Image: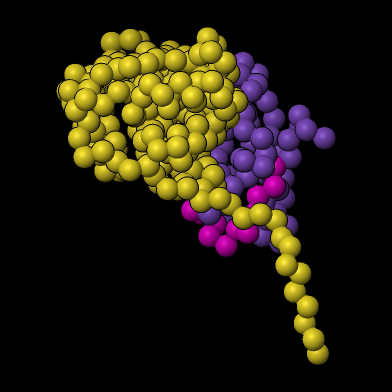
Amino acid sequence: MTQIYLPDSAPGLEMAALATSPGSLAGKRIAVLDNGKPNAGVVMTRAAETLAARAGAEVSLVTKKGPQGLSANAAVPMARDVLERLLAESDLVITGAADCGSCTAYSVQDAIELERAGIPAVVVTTTMFEPIATTLSSNFGLAGTRRLVLPHPLGGTDTPTLHEWADAATDQLISLFTTGS
Amino acid sequence: MNLDLEPARELMAADGIELTFVRMEDEVAHLSMSVVDAECAECVLPPEMLEPVILDLLRTSHPTLAGVRIIDPIQP
């Protein structure tokens, strides 16, 4: 009996790898990619500022993810022009907030796109949505995305508390950016 | 059957969605979701992204579960 194999099939998942992690963050440019979820910008900007002060880096860009960085829809990928700006103006990116279903999916997707382009990117998620971030990272081709897990919820939490959470995350951010975990 | 829906229900509730067990067929759990708080309609993941997430959560209590199918009232 002759067996015939069809050589066609659905394209497989394109696997990604983390961008090279820098040994030190000194002198690095940190960007914040804000998807517009309530308090996302507040907590991520504070985290970036604290990290920069601690590591001798600088916050070079804080932008929303919509075209020209002027608006944000958390349920879509970042705009092309925003990606180009991030690639030109930053060495590291903090993105999120991954604190709903679709915004977790697209924050993870944005982070993977940045990692593919050589920019280490940390996804800020919350305890509630960590399972979604973990599963979708794997499903999107990069199981080991750099994920910072903060308490839930971010929206509705007062600013001093958000700043506390952001400041407390500095050691973890350094580790995520320099070692990937 | 020992299918603990609670972790999945808790996760969905954060997006204003209620998850209900419909039936088990060939080790595939069929679930229905309904909107209980439409404040953030775009927050909810489409079923094709949601199903593997729910499957991972349900497998902790039901390791032999082969799949999850979600009946989405928004989609035909």
Query: x, y (%) of residue A32?
Result: 39, 20
Query: In this orientation, does residue A43 appear?
Result: no
Residue at image position (71%, 39%) is: B32
Residue at image position (74%, 40%) is: B71
Residue at image position (78%, 78%) is: A4
* Foreground pick, A147 / A113: A113
Farthest-out residue, front: A88
Query: x, y (%) of residue A2?
Result: 80, 86
User: Total marks drawn?
Assistant: 0
Please state if A126 lies on the left or on the right of B61 as rendered: left
Tell me the colour chain A is drawn in: yellow
Magenta residue span? B60-70
Above or below, A135 against B45 in this view is below
Dominant SS of magenta comes to: loop
Query: x, y (%) of residue A20?
Result: 33, 43
Tell me the colour chain B is drawn in: purple
Q: In which quarter of the image is residue A74?
A: top right
* Foreground pick, B16 / A137: A137
Above or below, A148 against A2 in this view is above
Query: x, y (%) of residue B48?
Result: 67, 42
Report the colour scheme.
by chain
Please state if A30 lies on the left or on the right of B65 as rendered: left
Please state if A133 lies on the left or on the right of A60 as rendered: right
